[in-house]
Amino acid sequence: MAAKGRMPGDPDPEEMKRRMIRVDHAGEYGALRIYEGQLAVLGRRRVGEVIQKMADGERRHLAVFEKMIVERRVRPTLLSPLWHVAGFALGAGTALMGEKAAMACTVAVEEVIDEHYARQAEALGA
């Protein structure tokens, strides 16, 4: 019989945590690549300082998840090469459209991340 709130076939709590770590690691990597793409285009402008601070934050977050992946023996996503290219392209593309577009992308990324983590916390009962 499945545990309370779980259906047959649902991942057990430990597998759910591993999946969350994998997804979060990929998300932090993708976000960093977006900011790196933006910096490649706008890095020498005044807005580059703001983007650099965002990128530095993502680097710190990514380091936490990289440590968790090793410590908890979680397989990283197989899609990292895709996020490497797609994240940079999204960042550079929005930056090429101008500072407003780049900042709109940044706001959207951060909002999605916040919502994602809130849903995870709820799923974990936090």
Image (cartoon, grey):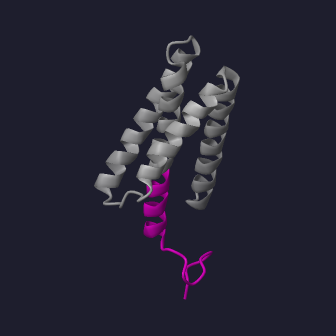
Q: Position of residue 86 (x, y in %)?
A: 52, 45
Residue beneath the point at 44% across and 27% down: 56
Residue beneath the point at 60% across and 77% down: 4
Query: In terms of image quadrants, where is residue 46?
Result: top right
Q: Nearer the viewer, residue 12 or 47?
A: 47
* Res 31 visible: no
Query: In terms of image quadrants, where is residue 63?
Result: top left
Which quarter shows the C terminus?
Answer: bottom right
Which quarter shows the N terminus?
Answer: bottom right
Residue at the top extreme of this rendering: 46
Residue at the bottom extreme of this rendering: 1
Residue beneath the point at 44% across and 44% down: 84
Asked if residue 9 is positioned above or below residue 89 in the image, the reply reads: below
Instruction: Tell me if residue 10 is in the magenta stretch.
Output: yes
Judged left or right of residue 63, residue 111 is right
Count the marks: 0
Q: Nearer the viewer, residue 101 or 77?
A: 101
Q: Position of residue 105 (x, y in %)?
A: 65, 34
* Res 78 visible: yes
Asked if residue 61 is positioned above or below residue 15 in the image, the reply reads: above
Residue beneath the point at 50% across and 13% down: 44
Judged left or right of residue 56, residue 90 is right
Asked if residue 113 is positioned above or below residue 75 in the image, the reply reads: above
Q: Nearer the viewer, residue 39 or 11?
A: 39
Q: Nearer the viewer, residue 21 or 6?
A: 21
Instruction: Tell me if residue 41 is in the magenta stretch.
Output: no
Which residues lie in the magenta part?
A: 1-24
Q: Position of residue 96 (x, y in %)?
A: 61, 26
Judged left or right of residue 37, residue 116 is right
Q: Position of residue 45 (x, y in %)?
A: 55, 12
